[in-house]
Structure formats: C-alpha cells, structure tokens
Image: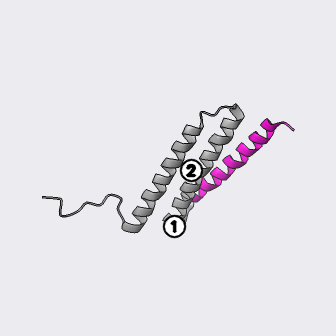
Amino acid sequence: MNYNIILIIALVIVALSMLGMLVRVIIGPTLADRVVAIDAMGIQLMAIVALFSIFLGTEYMIVAILLIGILAFLGTAVFAKFMDKGKVIEYDNDDHH
C-alpha cells in the first residue's frame, strides 16, 4: 500500500480531532477545559507539521515543530499562572518609588 495515502488519512484524522478541540475551546465549561484544549491543539499542530514534513520528504520542518512546542508550553504555563494568581505579571511593591 502506498504510504502517501496513509499519511493523508492520518492528516485528515488529526485535522478532525483538532476541530473537536476547537469546539472544546469555544464552548468549554471552565477555563481549565479551555487551557487543556489549547494545549492539545498545540500538540496536534505539531503532529500535522510532522506528518506534512514526512509527506514532503523534508527534515527542515523540525525547527517549526520545536518552535510550536515551545510556544505551546509557554502558553500553557502563562494560563496556569493566570488561573492560579489572577494575573500574569506581578510587580513587587518595594521596587516602586
């Protein structure tokens, strides 16, 4: 069987699951559900880029996959801090004159 057909089927399946996560981001009942869905969308986007890289036969997309992974991690960490403290950047009151 041709591997290109398998790659296209895998791309379609991951894209459909990404649409499902988009629905969870939009109608998620809590902020935690939305954060988990956004993190899952980042992982799925990495999978789509990896499958597309295999389909094209190139290895230069690995840098894009690493960049997406770093941004997804930072986004999840920022949302977690926002959920915990209510703000992302905290200022120390002693430093302001």
Q: Residue at x 41, y 62 (%)?
A: 81
Q: Position of residue 57 (x, y in %)?
A: 70, 32
Q: Main secondary structure of the magenta part?
A: helix
Q: Position of residue 80 (x, y in %)?
A: 45, 62
Question: Along the line of sight, which residue is nearer the eye, 25 or 67?
Answer: 67
Q: Which mark is residue 95?
A: none
Question: Along the line of sight, which residue is nearer the eye, 82 or 59?
Answer: 59
Mark 1 lies on a secondary structure that is loop
Q: Pointer 1 and pointer 2: residues touching (CB < 8 Å)?
A: no
- Residue designated by label 1: 30
Q: Earlier in the sequence, mark 1 or mark 2?
A: 1
Q: Which residues are magenta?
A: 1-24
- Residue 10 colored magenta? yes
| Within-10-Å neighbours for mark 2: few <14, some 14–19, many 20+ | many
Mark 2 lies on a secondary structure that is helix
- Residue designated by label 2: 42
Q: Is residue 79 above or below residue 45?
A: below
Residue type highlighted by circle 1: Thr
Q: Residue lying at the far right in this picture: please name it.
A: 1
Q: Is residue 86 left or right of residue 30?
A: left
> From the image, which quarter does the N terminus lie in?
top right
